[in-house]
Structures are given as C-alpha cells and as structure tokens.
Image: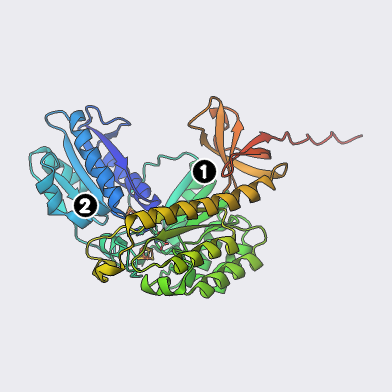
Amino acid sequence: MPTVYVETYGCQMNVSDSELMLGKLAAAGYSPVEQPDGADVILVNTCAIRDHAEQRVIGRLGELKRHMKSDTVMGVTGCMAQRLGPQLLEKARHVSLVVGPDGYRALPQLVEGARRGERAIETSFDLEEHYEDFTPRRFDKVKAWIPVQRGCDYRCTYCIVPTTRGAERSRRLEEVVRETREVVASGMSEVVLLGQTVNSYTDGTHDFADLLRAVGTVPGIRRVRYTSPHPNDFSDRVIAAMAEVPTVCEHVHLPMQSGSSRMLKRMLRRYTREGYLDCVERIRRAIPGVSLTTDIIVGFPGETDEEFEETLSAVREVGFADAYTFIFSPRDGTPATRMPAELTVPAAVASERLQRLVETVRTMSRQRNMGLLGTRHEVLVEREAKRGEAMLMTRTRDFKTVLVPGDSAMLGQYLTVELTGTTGSTFTGAVVRERQPLPMAG
Ligand code: SAH
Ligand code: SF4
Ligand code: F3S
C-alpha cells in the first residue's frame, strides 16, 4: 500500500481538515504514517495567518525535501496553498500539488496525477463543500474536532482568512448531530465545534443555540466546547443555551483584539470596547464560574500608547484566564496594508507592548490561580504530558490544564483532582479517590 504523511500548521480547523484529508486518502488505499521518511505522499497543511507562520512552513518544506524518495509526491494544502497558488509551484520545485481548503475531495485523483509526474493546482472555492461523506482519521482519541462552519463573512482589516477560506457557510444541524453520535459510538465524550465565527452558525433553520442544544443532548456526550465565537454573534439565545445545557463547558474563548474602540473600528471588528465588556458581562451573569480566554493583537497600524493602555486596562478589567497575544503582521491584499505608511508601529515598540501585555496577562492569571490551590475539579485525561514521566495532561471543564500522575491506561477517563500547585498558567493536581459507597446494611 502506498503511504501518506500529513503535517499540520495553524488552527484547529486545519487539524480537522487534515483528519478529513487522511480519511479520504485512506479510503482511496493510502496508509497513513507518522513519519515523513520514505512516505509516498507528503502533505503539508499550511497556515497563512501571520508572516511568521508562512516562513516556518517554507523552512519546513526545504527540510522535508531530505525525506523524499525519488518518486515521493510533495503537496501543499490549506491556507497558504490558497493564498499563493502557482507561486508555490514556481518557488518550490519539489512541490507538485497545491490544494486549497475547498479542494480536498479531488485529492486522490490529484495525488494519482502527481505520481504520474503531473503538477497541479486546485484552489477554487466551493460553497457547498462540507466533506459530509468523508470519514475523518482522527488524531485525537479523547476529544473530537467537529467543523460546523467553513469560511468567514467578517472582513477584519488585518485578516487573511476570508481570502484563504472564502465565504461563510454552515453544515446542516442533522449532519453535525450525526457526526457527534459517531464520535460517541467510537468511545469519545468530548466534542469541539469549529468555525471562524462559530456562533454565527445558521443552516437556514437552526442557529448556534439550537446546535448547542442538539449536540449537547446527544446521549454519551459529557463535554461540548466551541471555538471561536465572535462577540457580535453572542445572542441571548446562545448564552441561554450555554447556561442551560449541562454538557456545554464553562469556558468561552472570546477574541478581543484590542481594548480601544478606535483601534477596533480600524480593525473593522464591528464592536466597541463597551460592547465587548457588555458581552463579557452578559456571559458572566448567565454562567457562574465561566472562564474567559482571548486573542489580542498589538502594533496594529496607528496604535498609540494610550490606545495600547486601553488594551491593558481591558485585560485587567476582564481578568482573562489566558490570552493568545500577537504582533500585527501585515498580510498582502488585506485592507490594513493600504493604511498610510506613517501609521506603521515600529517593530521595537510593538515588541515592547507585547512584552507588557504578556506580563499583565501572566500576573493576573498567576494571582487567580494561586487562589485556586486546594480546590477540587472534574478533569478529563486528554493525553500523556510531553515532559516528565508518568504524567498526564488533563483539563477542567473551564479549560485549565492540570498535570496529574498516571499512565496511558487512564486516557479518556474523568477524574476528580485537587489542585496542588501552579506554575502560574498551568496546575499540578492530585487525584482524589472518590469514597466507595458503603454497602447497604441488611
Ligand atoms: N476567526 C477568529 C480568529 C482567527 S485567526 C476570530 O475572529 O476570532 C486567530 C487570531 O490570529 C485572531 O484572533 C487574531 O488575534 C490573530 N491574527 C489574525 N490576523 C492577524 C495578523 N494579520 N497579524 C497578527 N495577528 C493576527
Ligand atoms: Fe479573520 Fe475577523 Fe473572520 Fe476572525 S472574524 S476569521 S479575525 S476576518
Ligand atoms: Fe491559519 Fe487558515 Fe486557520 S490562515 S489560522 S490555518 S483558517
């Protein structure tokens, strides 16, 4: 059997796409392998979100050349493939396939063609494409990524995603429920619903609130998560569904990007600082104990010191459990690249801001986390910890990472743990033995 190796960069949507690609190729007779060495087909599923992400892939493509046999087919898929198309074939002579996010249905034929020596590009968008008939080859054994929406209809001025993934479209609720049932049947109890603005989900009949209720009540499901919602699409219905469906976890990843209304306007985020804080308030009121994480960009064109301070103050006001922080990276073709050059924030200023932001986030989460030592939580064992022997990486419902001692036999189990230590961002914990119920007398 010919073998295929897939390497994935970027967001969970790309991870999910890689699972679909592997499923499709496995159905066509390819055997998935975990190492590139000697594989008949190597696919690199790429991300275009920041220049750094693309540079990493370019470097990696060069490295992977060493693992190719004389007849190995090397393909580039995903957002960079979509963005660069023919340029990739020109620049990297050892690449013979370039396939964008809507082109994976044709992969078996494209790979066959490439094995006969053809070079091909498939970057058309297909607004009907959800790969419904594919059987994903999931990498993760404990939680399942389920795409519910593809593409994006927002036009944030810094962002390349609308260009690389096309217009927003949602799967039918019935299809998402069917996949959830299959996931449960295969032994998993956690799903993560994926979409670029996942809470704007609509299949014409059902909204995201309906979807949460439907997925959350599939028998056997214990945890439902989703990522990433847009603050503007947090209707009261969605918040109520989150609050009322017990399986929906008490965690929201709510990208803020900036705490300054002027910056948000320039970014075309379509909400103000107050609008964002109000959204946080509505979520917190409905869901006690909910934890919030976020994405923030510093150094967007025109960001002044005062505007950056507003981001810091918003971070303090919300008290995020964690934040993914980025220095603005200009992406060709996005509106932000057409802003006047004098608005460019110098690299040194941007790095200094990033540093301060990271410090602020860390200080706040450390304080909060110290206060949680000694408390007990339900965790799900997700995987073996990378470092340290016989340690497991587990997560609480509100998305805290807790390292506990144990072995691989415990993967997928739910445990009660007591938090015993914290590095500031993650915890160590001890498994609490639930007391066995006493035998009934008489
Ligand atoms: N659809 C999601 C975000 C997807 S991209 C949303 O709207 O929330 C993930 C994160 O990358 C974004 O939230 C943003 O913080 C960051 N990002 C996107 N484009 C960027 C750019 N050009 N430079 C720096 N960071 C960027
Ligand atoms: Fe990009 Fe904005 Fe769409 Fe998110 S909502 S993917 S940041 S354009
Ligand atoms: Fe990257 Fe594409 Fe995801 S640009 S972040 S892989 S949607």
Instruction: Please state which of residues 345 and 375 is positioned toward the viewer in this rendering.
Output: 345
Q: Which residue is painted at 62% across and 58% down in the image?
A: 290
Q: What residue type is labelled 1?
A: Met
The circle drawn on residue 270 is: none
Instruction: Please state which of residues 298 and 353 is positioned toward the viewer in this rendering.
Output: 353
Q: Which of disc 2 and disc 1 is earlier in sequence?
A: 2
Q: What residue type is labelled 2?
A: Ala
**Count of numbered badges drawn on the protein:** 2
Colour scheme: rainbow
Image spot of residue 7 (x, y percent)? 30, 40
Q: Which of marks 1 and 2 is in front?
A: 2
Quadrant position of ligand 2: bottom left
From this view, report whether residue 236 is shown above or below residue 162: below
Instruction: Please state which of residues 193 and 163 is positioned toward the viewer in this rendering.
Output: 163
Q: In which quarter of the image is the N terminus?
A: top left
Q: In this view, does 41 lie to the left or right of 223?
A: left
Q: In this view, does 8 lie to the left or right of 305?
A: left
Q: Distance between the residues labelled 1 and 2?
A: 32 Å
From this view, report whether residue 389 is shown above or below residue 59: above
Judged from this view, the residue extending furthest toward the left is 117
Residue wearing tag 2: 81
The circle drawn on residue 188 is: 1
Image spot of residue 313 (x, y percent)? 55, 64
Q: Which residue is painted at 24% across and 48% down in the image?
A: 77
Label 1 element class? loop
Check disc 2: other Cα within 10 Å, few if <14, some if 14-19, many if 20+: many
